[in-house]
Amino acid sequence: MLSKQSAIPLYKQVKSEILSDIRSSVYKVGETIPTEIQLEKRYNTSRITIRKAINQLVSEGVLLKKQGKGTFVQPQKVKRNLLDLVSYTSYMKETGQKPDAVIRVLEVKPADAGWSKILHIIEGDPIIRLARTMDLGQNNSGYEVSYYSLERFPDLDKRITEGASVTKILNEQYDTFGNSSEQTLNVISASQQIADYLKLEIGSPIYQLDRTVYEDNGSVMYSAVMYYDVNKVSFSVNTKER
Amino acid sequence: MLSKQSAIPLYKQVKSEILSDIRSSVYKVGETIPTEIQLEKRYNTSRITIRKAINQLVSEGVLLKKQGKGTFVQPQKVKRNLLDLVSYTSYMKETGQKPDAVIRVLEVKPADAGWSKILHIIEGDPIIRLARTMDLGQNNSGYEVSYYSLERFPDLDKRITEGASVTKILNEQYDTFGNSSEQTLNVISASQQIADYLKLEIGSPIYQLDRTVYEDNGSVMYSAVMYYDVNKVSFSVNTKER
């Protein structure tokens, strides 16, 4: 219902009506919304208001105009819960998708000053560096680089295989589980390599999520840097005061 | 110490050394780093490696080159903890800064469909819409728009004054405290208005943090949408498994 007395611009009211209709699946993801003439009638407003509302939804990535084909409801962003450190493999299974991670680099090398500090090991001690791209569905990929102490997890480099869940290997073969974590989220510009992996233009804004997970005894289980397309991922944090 | 045998490119080793020297205040925020000649000696490497390391640190916003003045260590980003819903006013006081919020809009209006759903009230019921810019120090501003039910908090609109902490008013005058919260973080393109408030170019990537805070009994205390410059704010989430 549109109210002309309200201080909200009309097109914003229409926009919020359209969003509500998308949420309630009046317009479904992957399908087109009605024509402008039909929308004018449905929301009882002018063509110019409809256009303004639609243009804003297009610029927000909710709708996508395809030349000669209509205006489509875009897939929702992938929503990752920052409090639930569920592994990539589990996440995909929970959401009914097939995990598909590709190993880009798997190497053992001496820890530099920075990583030795983060992993609580001595500089020069061997670390495993695992770089992977992870398919998140809907043509959406993440790029993740994880670091593990080889002395803490002997032979881990030999046990990591394409498609294996490293978390599962750590849980089952090394009997360790994450107990606490520190995460920092930034937005940076995609380098050439990451842009390629994420199918973006170089310099596009991407999330960089730094995560260090600790074992029961406070030692570091792993540390990872993850990169995601800002237009395809959002993060949620739901807290309950204790 | 730089290791030539390592698989890490030399410039990345130099970069990590410089970062470590910034962290340990060998190079201080707001001051220049040494000249390229001096850095060559200090890190015992070539001019081209030094340049590559510095260019990368410039592109990451750690360093800033000023024509004819040198290369400066940039101020750190403001780091907001997503688990600690500390009010703006308390945050500034805790970090030794003076809170400086400017009210841009303070109005009472009927709730539209979307906000009535979020605030758990009936469409058309009066809501307070409070839009403010908040100074975060170091030429960094946030823009926040908060929504409150006027029926839940009678006269709140009259009690909100420039510089007042709304959280404090709610705590002290309405005896209510946030108990749980839902937050979603996205990155969007700055509209003209928000770009002006945040002193950015239109279309710049900005964080949009949606937050709804609930009272003890599960009713909504407030809901807010907050906007921050991605280059000046990062978010942290540290979890402890229970």
Image (tube, coloured by chain):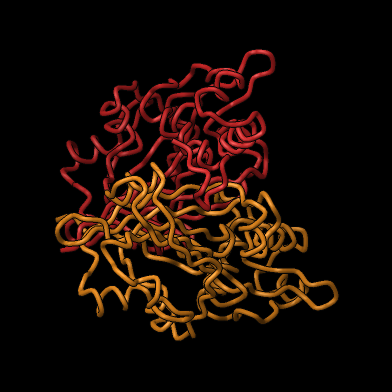
Chain colours: A orange, B red
- In the image, A119 versus B181, the foreground residue is A119
How far across and down, in percent of the image, does residue B145 sit?
A: 45, 43
Please say if A112 is above or below B75.
below
Quarter of the figure with the C terminus of chain A? bottom left
Give the left or right position of residue B162, taking residue A56 as reference.
left
In this view, which residue lies farthest toward the right? Answer: A68
Between A208 and B86, the residue placed more toward the observer is A208
Q: Is residue A206 above or below residue B156?
A: below
| Position of residue B7 measured from the top left corner of the image (x, y, whole percent) | 52, 53
What residue is drawn where x is 50% and y is 55%?
A: B186
Looking at the image, can residue B111 be seen?
yes
Name the residue: 69% across, 52% down: A202
Please state the total of marks drawn on the protein image. 0
The relative height of residue B120 versus residue B165 in the rendered view (above or below) is below
Tell me which residue sits at (55%, 45%) in the image.
B206
The percent position of residue A74, horizontal first and vertical second, equals 63, 72
Residue B196 visible (yes or no): no
Of all residues, the one furthest to the top in this rendering is B69
| Residue at image coords 34%, 21% | B98
Q: In the image shown, does B141 or A47 lie closer to the viewer? A: B141
Judge whether B217 appears above or below B76 on screen.
below
Which quadrant: the N terminus of chain A? bottom right
Q: Residue A78, position in %: x, y?
A: 50, 69
| Among the 4 quarters of the image, the one containing residue A216 | bottom left
View extreme (front): residue: B5
Q: Nearer the viewer, residue A215 or A71?
A: A215
